[in-house]
Image (cartoon, rainbow, N blue to C red):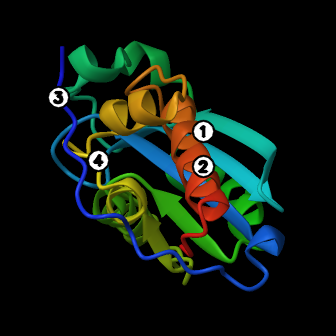
């Protein structure tokens, strides 16, 4: 049995118009240690505190080497015939264009993957602010450890960890739960 430590109660602020926010939760899975090796992407759009759309893409990374198959189950054979990031960009871009922000659990990782994939493809990176649900869940509930499965267990969110769409949906639900608690992302 895992132990959760709760810190001091968070300072709660009602965010003006938070129920009118549109945001996209994003999760990448990578093939290798390089951030440009995205092999899967999950996107979940939230409008007015409700999930409005979901999208999942397998992506052909720039190299055939797969180091993280044991984590996410994706192999080169799964993605060899899929489009690369550059070919998917128009669909991804249109999905996030109207978002007020992007959310990710450990946002620095997903932001780095997004920017590296855009750079490799010579695409203009989106300028969205990233909200990190690791930090948000710490502010809202003081959960420790702060890994995605722990936060999901605390909030009763279903999760198939390292499935990009499941991770993105869990992230979206964390943001929604924090907003309902009065925590402004």
Disc on the earlier residue, 2 or 3: 3
Task: Give coordinates of residue 37: x percent, y percent.
Answer: 31, 45
Disc on the earlier residue, 1 or 3: 3
Residue 122 disc label: none
Task: Indicate the secondary structure of the residue bearing disc 3.
Answer: loop
Callout 3: 10 Å neighbours few (<14), some, many (20+)?
A: few
Residue 143 disc label: 4
Task: Give coordinates of residue 146: x percent, y percent.
Answer: 25, 46
Residue positioned 62% across, 46% down in the render: 43
Q: CA distance from mark 2 to mark 3?
A: 24 Å
Residue 169 disc label: 1
Residue depth check, mark 2 versus mark 3: number of the one nearer the observer: 3
Q: CA distance from mark 4 to mark 2?
A: 17 Å
Residue depth check, mark 1 versus mark 4: number of the one nearer the observer: 4
Q: CA distance from mark 1 to mark 4?
A: 19 Å
Residue under numbered circle 2:
172
Residue under numbered circle 3:
3
């Amino acid at each position: 049995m895992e132990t959760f430590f709760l810190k001091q109660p968070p300072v709660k602020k009602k965010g003006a118009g938070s129920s009118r926010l549109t945001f996209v939760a994003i999760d990448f899975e990578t093939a290798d240690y390089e951030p440009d090796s995205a092999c899967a992407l999950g996107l979940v759009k939230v409008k007015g505190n409700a999930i409005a759309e979901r999208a999942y893409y397998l992506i052909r990374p720039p190299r055939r080497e797969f180091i993280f198959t044991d984590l996410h189950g994706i192999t080169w054979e799964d993605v060899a015939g899929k489009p690369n990031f550059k070919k998917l960009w128009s669909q991804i871009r249109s999905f996030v264009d109207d978002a007020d922000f992007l959310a990710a659990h450990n946002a620095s990782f997903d932001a780095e993957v997004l920017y590296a994939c855009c750079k490799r493809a010579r695409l203009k990176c989106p300028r969205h602010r990233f909200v990190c649900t690791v930090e948000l869940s710490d502010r809202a509930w003081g959960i420790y450890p702060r890994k995605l499965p722990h936060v999901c267990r605390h909030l009763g969110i279903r999760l198939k960890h390292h499935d990009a769409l499941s991770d993105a949906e869990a992230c979206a639900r964390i943001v929604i739960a924090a907003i309902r608690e009065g925590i402004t992302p």
